[in-house]
Amino acid sequence: DAKTTQPNSMESNEEEPVHLPCNHSTISGTDYIHWYRQLPSQGPEYVIHGLTSNVNNRMASLAIAEDRKSSTLILHRATLRDAAVYYCILRAENYGGSQGNLIFGKGTKLSVKP
Amino acid sequence: NAGVTQTPKFQVLKTGQSMTLQCAQDMNHEYMSWYRQDPGMGLRLIHYSVGAGITDQGEVPNGYNVSRSTTEDFPLRLLSAAPSQTSVYFCASRPSPGASSYNEQFFGPGTRLTVL
């Protein structure tokens, strides 16, 4: 499975933008980039995913480098509720069977200061 | 929809005891899986199922059994609990490729298990 590298922790101030980086230099052409987050004492929840183009949804934006070897999750205005562990995960496009399994690393623990 | 539900929320076992962690989903998802999360670590896949009657092993299957007799339920059985199985267990489900929201995996709230 292609591997991702994320910083162990980051800090942000409330209401400021946050840029969470992820390196995935061995990504294959059919790997989608997924982001999940895990709030304290909860199960992970889906945030966003993309393949090549930048993506936006109500929770966040995903900026993908042109060579796809890195990506950045952008929270436009951090709130205290955004304090969580953020996981960057690669998953194959055709994810039948075991290819659909999500392989979690340790993620980035985001702290948000009021 | 209730989503993915797990019972119990908390459980304490003695070494050697057996028990079943329950997981159910009401979204008609074909794929279901079990993860464990140890303190300060990411989630590790235990077992998964791509449909009723079909299960397979993940990264850390030893000491656990699963079965999938219905689409809705995917119980995880601990055969003989050991202290090393103290962890938080998460069940997850996702739709089949082609279904709406097929890229999202939905997780339950977790079961916190302590083995003494």
Image (cartoon, rainbow, N blue to C red):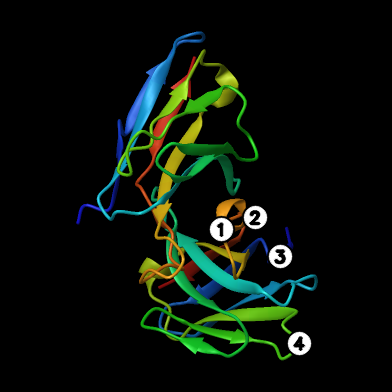
Q: Marks 3 and 2: CB-CB under 8 Å?
A: yes
The residue marked by circle 3 belongs to what chain?
A
Residue B38 can be seen, yes or no: no
In front: B78, or B9?
A: B78
Q: Rounded to the nearest whole Å, what is the CA distance between mark 4 and mark 3?
A: 15 Å
State which tag comes first along the sequence, 3 or 2: 3
Say which residue label 4 marks. A67
Quarter-of-image position of residue A92: bottom right
Disc 2 on helix, strand or loop?
loop
In front: B113, or A65?
A: A65
* Residue farthest along the right direction in this orientation: A26
State which tag comes first along the sequence, 4 or 3: 3
The residue marked by circle 2 belongs to what chain?
A
Q: Which mark is residue A105?
A: 2
Say which amino acid is labelled 1.
Gly
Residue drawn 56% across and 90% down?
Answer: A54
Say which amino acid is labelled 3.
Thr
State which tag comes first along the sequence, 1 or 2: 1
Q: Is residue A101 above or below residue A112?
A: above
Residue drawn 72% across and 77% down?
Answer: A29
Q: Is residue A59 above or below residue B46?
A: below
In front: A21, or B29?
A: B29
Instruction: Name the spot of residue B90 as percent of width and height, x first.
Output: 44, 42
Say which residue label 3 marks. A4
* Residue farthest along the front direction in this orientation: B53
